[in-house]
Image: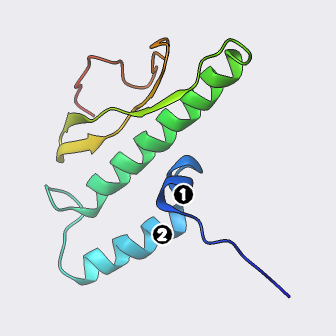
Amino acid sequence: MNMTKNKTTKEKEAAGFDYPTFKQEAIAGLKAGKGLMGPEGVLKGMIGRLLSAAFEGEMATHMGSEAGLGNKRNGHTDKTLRTALGPVPVKPPRDRKGSFEPVIIKKSSTCRV
């Protein structure tokens, strides 16, 4: 008997960028009349997902380097990046000790991507 476990949204986000799902959503958006660029464009969602996957990878590396030091993940913080496509919401992860310093986009930065 083949039993598969359905992944929760949180598990999918932790696994990184889900290209097949993005592809399906992008095609559906384009068929529905959304453009590639702009506030409702399909590329805006891709940027947010790619950055979230990068943040999760950085956090996994950070937590691995702090193994045994009593530090744990502590949710996410909301951040809005200003991009050429418009504002893109992302949720960088945080840790309990506050020692996680993202490299891809610094803590207090709202840079243009």
Q: Residue at x 22, y 30 (%)?
A: 112
Percent of width and height locating residue 62: 61, 21
Pointer 1 or 2: first along the chain: 1
Residues under labels 1 and 2: Cα distance? 10 Å
Residue that carries the numbered disc 2 in the rendered image: 21
Q: Residue at x 28, y 63 (%)?
A: 42
SS assignment at label 1? helix
Q: Residue at x 37, y 73 (%)?
A: 25
**Residue 108's image quarter?**
top left
Percent of width and height locating residue 94: 44, 26
Does 6 sit left or right of 109 as displayed? right
Does 19 sit left or right of 28 as displayed? right
Q: Which label number is shown at residue 12?
A: 1
Residues marked 1 and 2 touching at CB (< 8 Å): yes
Q: Amino acid at mark 1?
A: Lys
Q: Nearer the viewer, residue 16 or 2?
A: 2
